Image (spheres, rainbow, N blue to C red):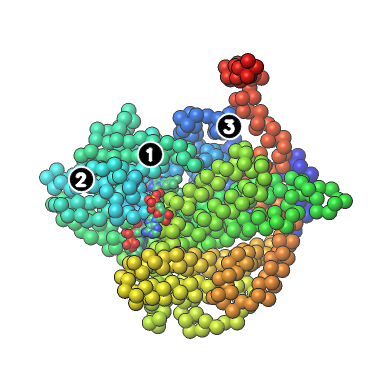
Amino acid sequence: MANVKCNPDLVRERAKCSFDVNELIHLIDGGENATKEKRHFEETIFSVKELQDAVPEEYLSHKDRYENAVRKATILRDVCREYMKKYNYKPNRFRVGHGVFKDVSPFLLHDGMFVATIIGQGTPEQQAEWLPKAENMQIIGTYAQTELGHGSFIRGLETRATYDPKTEEFILNNATLSSFKWWPGGLGSTVNHCIVVAQLFINGKSYGIQPFIVQIRDLNTHKPLPGVKVGEIGPKMGFQTANNGFLGFENFRIPRMNMLMKNAQVLKDGTFVKGMNEKLTYGTMVMVRVGIVGDCSLNTSLAATIAVRYSAVRHQSKIKAKEPEVQILDYVTQQHKLFIAIASSHVFRNVYSWLSKSYLNVMKDLAQGKQDHLPELHATACCLKAVCSRDAGSVVEECRLACGGHGYMTSSNLPLVYGFTIATVTYEGEQTVLLLQTARYLVKAWLAALQGKVLAPSVSYLSDWLKNDNVRWQNTPEGIVKGFQHVAAGKVKAAYDTIQKYIKLGKDYEDAWNLASVQLMKASEAHSRSILCEVSWGEVIRTSASPNLLQVLKQLAQLYLVYWTLETSGDFLVYSNISKDDIAILREKYEELLAAIRPNAVGLVDAFDLRDEILHSTLGSYDGRVYERLMEEALKSPLNQESVNASFHKYLKPLMEKAKL
Ligand SMILES: CCCCCCCC/C=C\CCC/C=C/C(=O)SCCNC(=O)CCNC(=O)[C@H](O)C(C)(C)COP(=O)(O)OP(=O)(O)OC[C@H]1O[C@@H](n2cnc3c(N)ncnc32)[C@H](O)[C@@H]1OP(=O)(O)O
Ligand SMILES: Cc1cc2nc3c(=O)[nH]c(=O)nc-3n(C[C@H](O)[C@H](O)[C@H](O)COP(=O)(O)OP(=O)(O)OC[C@H]3O[C@@H](n4cnc5c(N)ncnc54)[C@H](O)[C@@H]3O)c2cc1C
């Protein structure tokens, strides 16, 4: 990239960077070798001509866009397969996916949930049957759980799987419209198999929801099998190429062994054997929630790179009347909008790495029959997924707005990035619903703290606070982290007390919970924020890097802490010993941090190492040729391929002529 002829502002920005950009790239990637491998892989993918679109896909029809996405998905699959064989390298398909599809792959659910559910929910025999076929794409699948009538409350799903011991089969039925599966990616026209999550019935008795692997289309003709009604749900706000679909069954029979039986089992005679914990059926969702935290880091870095580079190139208005128009990045308000995006991407990445480790540890425990840490993992993954996805959505939108009118252009790619980022707030568990799951855990933890019990590490601050809620405020990163814990503890206590108050007034527990649920949700958010602050600050101070880089990483981590303290200062005034003077000191600190980060802003986004082919942005390319690219892209519009459009003769001219009469 270094030889590309760049916009002079970007050249100047890069020259004043105080740290080694390559060092940060390697740190993010996990080592110099990892960067080399990543770059080699990406170079290979983006040099495949067939993966490059001649016409921007926004000009294609819905159908053509889908077909183009499938075409590219199959080529990408082949190239990756060859690459993996040749180099024994497992690539990050999500990262290059943004480049190849701009939006998302029609195979997203195959990779993200179908294969993962076979691994997580299948017995060794079932894995041996389906995993090789799924991994080499002999079968293509999705995860079909959500229905028209139910998404959040999965115990309310209506799709039925009724066991017939005579034939040793399950009979699938969707008797009502609301029971139709609705949303699964790839279901519309791509997949031939699904994990169907359905209510199990044996001898008229319900045994809760279970996962079934179901073939829905003929492998040769791709026609829906008899008894299957399947189709696509139509255009959405984003995810246009994900091919989300609907599905219903009418007396559709599948063999007994198609129920994934790693947890619960149905024996030949119809005996139901309970698993160790029925919530293990929800395992794929926990895994994807963890992954979404990592995805939030990537999405945020895409938007930050585009908006920061554009802000370095764009000049508008003046700070001092007699001086030239400034780079908009010099406006402190612009820095306020953008630097939190850079900082958030690092925070999400560090927290994702921490959460992934916890996830893997719990999976190891479960394999040995130990489930003590599962509730803590579930609670942590729920609130982090909810808060990170919401933050990422807000940050991406702020980056888009920070690009003014050009941020509204599809060619900036910011609208598309916003489209797939904001979807993460809803899918894999709607944010409020997940925050309330964590609140259940927090309330239990609070009760345990009141009873003097030892709490799990992520909530042990509740006991500390109970012992001493009168800690002197300290304007240090560690002091701020403590402050976030005090806010969280104060909010958990307040929510708990509110529940108790309603119970004393005669409400039953469930109604009291609902009445207190805004407070519960906020307590859960505060808990999540305290984890984000504690973990990210802890990771940064443990990082081994050169002094120059470490200084910048600490500035970013502190910016995150101070930004969120100021954003939620009302909470701090209520629940901690912060004073108005402390807040004034933090405001000053915030301004100092913005100024300190300013010279490194372009270097910091360069260190996300996002190739132009991944960014897909007229505003964010490495060379900063913003206006040239905007014009080049505009000229690709089909309306610019003719000097006079037919609508002139058909409609405009007659209109003008009528007006003359
Ligand atoms: C680095 C890059 C990686 C990129 C990664 C990107 C991946 C992208 C891949 C794919 C794209 C995905 C596209 C989208 C797919 C989907 O959306 S699939 C559908 C997802 N659906 C949901 O998430 C539904 C949300 N609802 C639920 O999860 C549940 O219904 C519920 C809200 C949890 C409630 O369940 P239920 O009513 O049964 O439970 P409760 O009565 O409330 O609670 C009972 C107790 O169970 C505990 N519990 C609940 N869930 C779990 C769990 N998963 N694990 C462990 N324990 C669980 C809960 O805490 C209660 O415990 P308690 O009684 O002790 O309090
Ligand atoms: C882009 C996209 C891709 C998706 N892909 C898939 C897929 O591949 N497979 C699949 O199975 N599903 C998929 N989904 C579905 C997704 O998982 C659900 O939409 C999601 O879980 C939310 O459920 P819902 O739509 O029923 O929302 P609802 O639950 O109806 O939410 C509506 C409102 O009700 C509130 N609410 C609901 N319950 C409660 C409660 N208990 N307490 C307080 N408030 C509550 C919510 O907070 C929200 O404000 C996808 C969705 C999207 C947007």
Q: Secondary structure at mark 1?
A: strand
Ligand 1 is found in which quarter of the picture? bottom left
Q: Position of residue 401 (x, y in %)?
A: 63, 48
| Looking at the image, residue 295 lies above or below residue 565 | above
Whether residue 316 is visible here, answered yes or no, is: yes
Locate residue 128 relative to residue 40 in the image: left or right.
left
Q: In this figure, which residue is indicated by the disc labeled 1?
A: 245
Residue 170 marker: 2
Whether the residues at callouts 3 and 2 have beta carbons within 8 Å, the answer is: no
Q: Secondary structure at mark 2?
A: strand
Q: Position of residue 617 (x, y in %)?
A: 63, 40
Can you say which quadrant of the picture contains the C terminus?
Answer: top right
Q: Pick whichever of labels 2 and 1 is earlier in the sequence.
A: 2
Q: Can you tell me whether the CB of the residue at mark 3 lies under 8 Å from the nearest atom of ligand 2?
A: no
Image point 66% across, 39% down: which residue? 618
Q: Amino acid at mark 1?
A: Gly
Locate residue 165 relative to residue 513 in the image: left or right.
left
How far is disc 2 from disc 1 in space, using C-alphas? 23 Å
Image point 32% across, 54% down: which residue? 154
Image point 66% across, 41% down: which residue? 406
How far is disc 3 from disc 2 in space, using C-alphas? 46 Å
Residue 56 marker: 3
Q: Pick whichever of labels 1 and 3 is earlier in the sequence.
A: 3
